[in-house]
Image: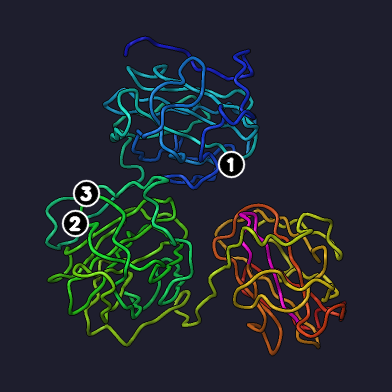
Amino acid sequence: MTTRIGPVLLLLLGLLVAPALSAQEAPGWNEEPYAQTLTLRSGFSGDPRVVDVTPGGASANPLNGPGCVGYIGYRPDVVVNYSAGSFDLTFSASSDTDINLVVRAPDGRYYCDDDSGDGLDPMLTIANPRSGRYAVWVGVYGESGEYVDGVFGISELGNAVSMGDQGGSGQGYTDSGSARTTTPAPVRSSSSTEIPGWNESPYAGSMTLEHGFSGDPRTMDVTPGGAQDNPLTGPGCVGYIGYRPDAVVTYNPSSFDLTFSAASETDINLVVRAPNGRYYCDDDSGDGLNPMLTIDNPSRGQYTVWVGVYAESSQYVDGVMGVSEVGNAVSMSDRGRAGQGYSGSDTARPTPLRVSSTEIPGWDENPYAGSMTLEHGFSGDPRTMNVTPGGAQDNPLTGPGCVGYIGLRPDAVITYDPSSFDLTFSAASTTDINLVVRDPNGRYHCDDDSGEGLNPALTVVNPSRGRYTVWVGVYGESSQYVDGVLGISELGHEVSVSDRN
């Protein structure tokens, strides 16, 4: 296809394709992206900022208008969280194949382009862009289910990417001296191949690691096996895995690659789901029949890990899993020294409870105590607020720490703009109290007594930007109300009763 079509702003330029109509809204627009999430402020360095992508998909582009052609993925390829200034915003993509581009702006308007860049590459510019979330699909013109190599770029200066920019964000495996002879790309998941239970609590445990962590490889004892036939297709995606993951690793990266390995006396295999929703599989790239895989340029966030067996459904064996920044693999001699924690600490953090049908009534009401808006690096850490723990509502959530009685409205609302810090919520009283936090993603976090004495404390790892809704409840009786104080910290500080004023 060689006809060049200029970039199109649907609705704004009179091509009235209402994004509010379900038939014109791209399914999965609010899902996690396949490739990466970028957070950029106006004036960002490294223009154009690039991300390696895999253009293509099984879904015919559901939008109507010039340039809205071809096939795209169910989920976006890239999400850009952008804080606008005075620049326009240019989106481009490049491949050796005819590809196209769809962008959903924060106001719900869609922009399409097919060939306005170099050759058959797409490129479009949004004038006077708004701050917020831009969801980007890079599709192919040719066939449903076709996937090709490509690169995506975003620029405030009108710069377009070319295939020479590929490599700005790596995918798949690296060769670190193992028996690998090829470097297969990660398995790309879709709505039909997402592993059931990927967001459930892990069987073995969780660990939170900061780049440069000590004790490399960090290890965890696991029990490889499961009754579920691995639903993914691709090299190394074999055998049987559990219905829940074996481990969850929350990782804050720097310049290191991230190696996952596992060991057992039996033929085992490994599946890793990266924060961007891509799956990586391996069977025997480690020593003997042990699996090992490396993720180049790892993203920040949650890595979900399954350690399966090759042979039989419902077979369970002893094993050990390891995570390394320097390519170290585990062996069975590492079993029994499992270490979990954060930056060398052996204190595990609880996995957040995700709920849907048990949304707390009144979560979006005005808070009893007050609201605060915090920018990363805020002074006066921990920032405190006097609260009155208690309420007449039995905590409707189920999960560890989700106990006691809370108010019909939240006690506090915190609007937070994050950076590289985790976010700790704590509360203190002379009575047994508990804590519930709803994060901007709709996930609930509960705690009862993880702080000092009977006080609650919990940490949200890799916090999202937005509204945190907080309830401080009591364990004892309905409609009991006591004096207390709430604290928010980026440094892990907890409040005490003496912080109440």
Q: Toward which corner of the image does residue 446 lie, by quadrant? A: bottom right
Sooner in the amino-acid sequence: mark 3 or mark 1? 1
Check contact, mark 2 vs mark 1: CB within 8 A.
no
Please check the rendered image and state whether residue 439 is part of the magenta-colored stretch, yes or no. yes
* Marks 3, 1: nearer the viewer: 3
Indicate which label's residue lies in the foreground, 2 or 1.
2
Closer to the camera in the image, 329 or 443: 443
Q: What residue would you read off at disc 2? A: 175
What amino acid is found at the position of numbered circle 2 in the picture?
A: Asp
What segment is highlighted magenta in the picture?
433-444
Left or right of 184: which side holds 110? right
Distance Cα–Cα, label 2 vs label 1: 35 Å
Type of amino acid at the residue the image marks with label 3: Pro
Residue with the mark numbered 1:
41
- In this rendering, the answer to whether 189 lies above or below 77 is below
The amino acid sitting under disc 1 is Arg
Residue 166 locus on image (x, y percent): 31, 37
